[in-house]
Amino acid sequence: MDFPEIPFGDKWLIEHYKDLINTTLKGVGWAKYQFLQRVAKEMVEVYEELDLIIDKGIASFCARCLTPCCVNRHCFPDFEDLIFYITSNIGLPHLDYHAKEHERCTFLGERGCTLPRSSRSYRCTWYFCDFSLDEFEKMDNLAYQNLENALRRLQKKRDILLVGFRELALQ
């Protein structure tokens, strides 16, 4: 089962897929649902760890950027994000469905993103421009290794969550 694509800003489709995910989760046993919630909770913990690492590494750099690469297109969730938001009980951030796709992200404030890291789309967590990557390289080795390790753990947890959901949906 491939997860469906969601065109930018399609509120109806986002709501439809949220309903579909909730219906799928309601149809499973409690133990399976708790497993997915536990994995999503572990993802939130890794997001919090990443936030500390990234704040030390590049947050002040990003806040000073004159040409931010954070655009509305990236903050909109994909189907996989919806699975995470629902199983983690975080909920979807309040999206501006009238925002223009390639304009400055509505969540970008004076000091960077205004959303907690776990409320951002997955692609927002993974995207680093060339300038921010240069800043990361200036970090000490241990800090950079911690960043890489946390990103790998997040990816593994997300893979487990998505495989688990996919298996439930196919039952």
Image (tube, helix red, strand yellow):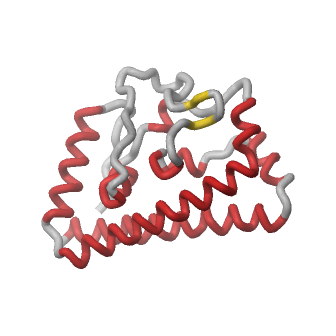
**Would residue 144 appear left or right of 14 to someone viewing this image?**
right
The structure residue drawn at horizontal position 19% and vertical position 52%, both measured from the top left corner, is 20
Residue 55 position in % (x across, y down): 69, 49
Relative to 100, say whether 51 is above or below: below
Point out the residue furthest to the bottom here: 31
Quadrant of the image occupied by residue 100: top left
**Number of numbered discs overlaid on the protein picture:** 0
Relative to 95, say whether 83 is above or below: below
The structure residue drawn at horizontal position 20% and vertical position 42%, both measured from the top left corner, is 16
The structure residue drawn at horizontal position 65% and vertical position 33%, both measured from the top left corner, is 111
| Quadrant where the C terminus is found in the figure | bottom left
Residue 129 position in % (x across, y down): 70, 41
Relative to 9, say whether 127 is above or below: below
**Would residue 69 appear left or right of 78 to someone viewing this image?**
right
**Would residue 94 appear left or right of 167 to someone viewing this image?**
right
Relative to 43, say whether 107 is above or below: above
| Quadrant where the N terminus is found in the figure | bottom left
The structure residue drawn at horizontal position 51% and vertical position 64%, both measured from the top left corner, is 45
Residue 133 position in % (x across, y down): 76, 48
Quadrant of the image occupied by residue 130: top right
**Would residue 137 appear left or right of 164 to someone viewing this image?**
right
24 or 95: which is nearer to us? 95
Residue 125 position in % (x across, y down): 57, 50
